[in-house]
Amino acid sequence: MEKLADFVKGKRQALKMTQQELARKAGVGYRFVRELEAGKTTIQLEKVNEVLKLFGHEVGPVPLERSSLINEKS
């Protein structure tokens, strides 16, 4: 499964956009784009969706593999 950071960076690079250009077009700050692409775990979901909207996507639930669950409750 592709990570969000890799997805955004790949889409941005495919469109030959800089991080600054992506930030401007998505209406978010450059620092936010930089942190998003770096995989920062504490980011604002609303801003993530503003970025993903440019690529025709939005955040949604993704099923986890059972083997990746650490504290599975019975």
Image (tube, helix red, strand yellow):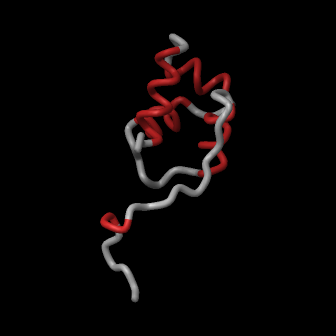
Residue 64, quarter of picture = bottom left
Q: Residue furthest top?
A: 16
Q: Is residue 69 left or right of residue 9?
A: left
Residue 34, quarter of picture = top left
Q: Residue furthest bottom?
A: 74
On the image, the x and y values in percent for residue 22 come to 58, 23
Is 13 drawn above or below residue 42 in the view shown? above
Q: Nearer the viewer, residue 49 or 72?
A: 72
Q: Nearer the viewer, residue 60 or 48?
A: 60
On the image, the x and y values in percent for residue 69 come to 35, 70
Quadrant assignment for the N terminus: top left
Q: Nearer the viewer, residue 60 or 29?
A: 60
Residue at (47% x, 39% y) in the render: 36
On the image, the x and y values in percent for residue 55 come to 63, 28
Is 50 drawn above or below residue 44 in the view shown? above
Residue at (50% x, 60% y) in the render: 63
Quadrant assignment for the C terminus: bottom left
Residue at (51% x, 21% y) in the render: 12
- Count of marks overlaid on the render: 0
Residue at (49% x, 15% y) in the render: 14
Residue 70, quarter of picture = bottom left
